[in-house]
Image: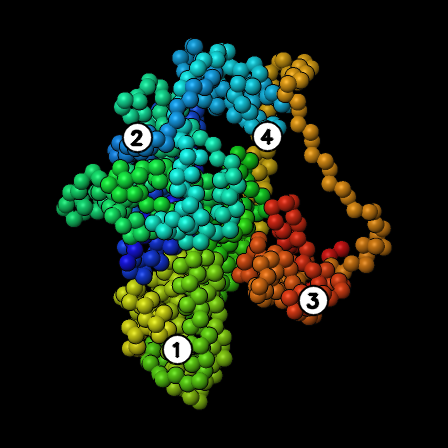
Amino acid sequence: MPRYLVTSALPYANGPIHFGHVIGAYLPADVYVRYRRMRGDDTLFVCGTDEHGVAITINAEATGVGYREFVDRWHRVIGDTLAAFGIQFDTPFSGTNRCRHHERISQRFFKNLHENGYLLQKTERQWYCEKDAMFLADRYLEGTCPFCGAENARGDECKKCGQWIDALALKNPHCKLCGTTPVVRETAHWYLDLPKLHADGVGEWFEGKNPRREHVEWKPNVRSFVGNMLADLHPRPITRDLRWGVPLPTPFTEEGKVLYVWFDAPIGYCSITQEVLEERARRKGETIEDNAWLDWWAPKNPSDVRLIHFIGKDNIGFHTIVFPSMSFGQGDRFGHPVVMPWAVPAMEFYNLQGRKFSTSDGWTIDPIEFLKRYPNVDAARFTLLSTSPETADSEFTFEDFQRVNNRDLADNLGNLLSRALRFAKDKLDGVVDRRDPTEAERALYAEVTPQIHAWAQALEKFEIRNACSALVAIGRATNRYFDACAPWSAIKSDRVAAERCIDWTTRCLGIIGILAEPFLPNAARAIRESVGIGGIDLRQAVDELLARSQVTAAEIGFRVGEVPILFQKIDDKTIAAEVAALRERAAASAKTTTKNMTENVPAAASQPAAPTPAAAPTPAAPAAAAGKPEITIDDFAKVELRVGTVVVAERVPKADKLLRLEVDLGTEKRQVLSGIALKYAPEQLVGKRVVVVCNLAPRTMRGLESRGMILAADDGSGPVIVSPTADVSPGATVK
């Protein structure tokens, strides 16, 4: 039986994290680990902060604090944020500077790669500050952009024109620390020979041709990204001239030279594993050896451990090419081969209210402050999970948060629990007895059973949104059953029928209380306690559900205790205020930025800018998109646009891009097919207001008739549905 080694990308200890980070690498991993442990699997979940690199040194120096003090501050902030979301790493939540094993294991990786012939040494020319006696890494260097002539371009990119810059091409360079002009000197650096590693077997592993190193099928976004990387592999530098980082091992030690942060950071998974195992041993009153981490990272049988990296889109290359190459290059020097990733369920980008998250622009949400305003963390977790960017960019909106909280959680789960238990308290003397099923209950279980299996299958394949949908679907099926039974009416003439309805409703609530554990740990616990299965063994319960769709521990009746309120509804005014506050913060940030730019313009800026050198031409501006022919108001008047509410959304079989929508237009319901399946999951759309082209001629696609079109905007990153920001009734005309 395989063991599961789960990692989340090490968050950079250089600032706070936002919702995009939480859903990108940490919350999905927490859900998966909780699921694996419910299935009885031996699972290790390691993470910590990435604490080296030039961005940290620059910002620490700018704030006047020491490097360790700087990373300690952000380590605490990041750890507290993740803990607030209920994300439970195996302790400790460590870091690459604070972990006492990290330097030793990182240096060992370097030496093994060198001994196996996978490192190269090259001499380079770099800017050197004679006053500060240091080579200037990109962010320590400023000057004039060779492309657009902008002042204050960095040594790696120009913020004005966006061009990547070769530091040696920077005009009028100066040291950011002291302002003096640097000189060019030669320095030697070590490189990881990625082409050689690829040729020696990493490429075969990625393509699934190496049976010793298995992996699941790559997600499409991962495969396409890595395919582009493999087509253009080059040796990659793994050392840097800095004063902060992991020093090179003996005999390669050189003053002022450290391992590049991208090289030592993923090795943090290994060093933190050692700390986790030591903490486990300490709790048992035991001690372990310094190489205990190898039991997980270099086991005798490589397929004994399944290594899973939960990461965001920007980390795909490191976790599918670079770190696997580093691991492959260890050979057998740790006694056995280092495990390779079994799965890398990378997320795409997660945006906020139609725009990218940007702390500097004020377009962000402070997670801790958010949870102070909305302390039910389960609602935040479920919103992020059900809108996660699994296969395409997605976004958090306050309207979606309200929809998920009110409809999927408060109405679908919380209200169902309250209605069933309060009825039992008021009408059944507070006792829920077990009753044999009739055809109605058998039909209910026939509807619920496929969703139980869909829940498990989705989590096995890292399809967390689908797993959320399965849970919601069980709640909806149970609500329909409860309403159809109408126990408030049945009890007037048939008490047994009313008792049977409450019995089977609470049985299904028990199923929800079990399956909700990975997503809604607090609500799941409250549900289980409320329906009499608070002490149930979750592993046994899941096994029984998947085998028979029943929970045998719940076969005895129970007495209703305190009826919990699982979720409080959020009103429209609260959501409108949140959106307004977000826009106000962004506007204030823009004013501050403009003011600072005006106040900090150097005196020389009033003089004409020097012409751009001929050797570095200014890139041509992109051509304007060709517009469509001009129309008259009479032409536009022919289009009938109406507001509708999506009441049903589902995927179209054998069509990757199509969703089938049923839209309530007030006086009628329309079936509309829309090519938005790569951007939206069906569950994101139910309840959403949309704008429909109503007088479009019907069209048949995949054997289904589409009567209308949903309006969407697309800037090249995928369609975004156009939706009214105010509460407009279905059928309202768009003018």
Say which of marks 4 and 3 sits in front.
3
Q: Which residue is mark 3?
A: 700
- Where disc 3 sits, the SS reads strand
- Neighbour tally class for label 3: few under 14, some 14-19, many 20 plus, Cα within 10 Å: few
Q: Which residue is mark 4?
A: 162
> Quick check: 254 above or below 368?
above
How far apart, in angstroms, are the residues tagged by discs 3 and 1?
42 Å
Tell me whether circle 3 and circle 1 mark residues in contact (CB < 8 Å).
no
> Quick check: 417 above or below 149?
below
Say which of marks 4 and 2 sits in front.
2
Any part of residue 574 in sight = no
Say which of marks 2 and 3 sits in front.
2
- Which label sits on residue 504? 1
| The N terminus sits in image quarter | bottom left
- Horizontal relation, residue 165 to residue 456: left or right: right
- Horizontal relation, residue 364 to residue 460: left or right: right
* Image location (x, y in percent) of residue 642: 71, 61
Type of amino acid under label 3:
Thr
First in sequence: mark 4 vs mark 2: 2
Q: Residue drawn 59% across and 33% down?
A: 590
First in sequence: mark 4 vs mark 3: 4
